[in-house]
Amino acid sequence: MFIITLTYKQPLEVVEQYLVAHRTFLEEGYVNNYFVASGPQNPRTGGIIIACLRDKKILADLLQRDPFYIHGIADYQIAEFIPVKFHKNFEYFLNLPQ
């Protein structure tokens, strides 16, 4: 699993111009069972994506299709982790084929 931290490089006015396209990108990730959760940070300096992919290279390639990446809106930091303790309802995301 991965936690992706996005840090905005542009003012919020510019971020807002690409927000619909970014959310469309995220929705494709949800449809394909790549993403578990996403949302803005508070304060709104960027966002967080939790991905249930198992391959960092596949994730990195996927993130390069994000309009925020394409248009230089955000920097991305990827942290990989292995869940060893988790709520029983979360197990579904750990067992998705990828």
Image (spheres, grey):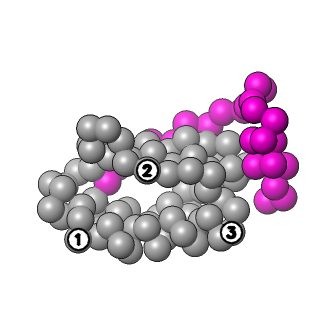
- Residue 94 appears anywhere in the view: no
Image point (75%, 32%), residue name: 87
Q: Secondary structure at mark 2?
A: strand
Query: As rendered, which of 37 and 53 lies closer to the eye?
Result: 37
**20 up-or-down from 54: above or below:** below
Q: Which mark is residue 46?
A: none
The residue wearing badge 3 is: 32
What is the distance, in whole Å, between disc 2 and disc 1 at their CAs?
17 Å
Q: Secondary structure at mark 3?
A: loop
Q: Going from the N terminus, do you reach mark 3 or mark 2 first? A: 3
- Looking at the rendered structure, the kind of residue marked 2 is Gly
Of badges 3 and 2, the one in the foreground is 2
Query: As rendered, which of 59 and 41 lies closer to the eye?
Result: 41
What is the distance, in whole Å, between disc 3 and disc 2 at their CAs?
18 Å
Q: Going from the N terminus, do you reach mark 1 or mark 3 first? A: 1
**Left or right: where 83 falls relative to 44:** right
Tags 2 and 1 touching, CB below 8 Å: no
Tags 3 and 2 touching, CB below 8 Å: no
- Looking at the rendered structure, the kind of residue marked 1 is Gln
Q: Which mark is residue 39?
A: 2
- Looking at the rendered structure, the kind of residue marked 3 is Asn
The residue wearing badge 1 is: 17
Q: Percent from the top left, x then y, of residue 62?
A: 56, 64
- Residue lying farthest top? 85
What is the distance, in whole Å, between disc 1 and disc 3 at their CAs?
25 Å
Which segment is the magenta one?
A: 74-98
Near mark 1 (Cα within 10 A), the count class, few <14, some 14-19 or many ≥20, is few
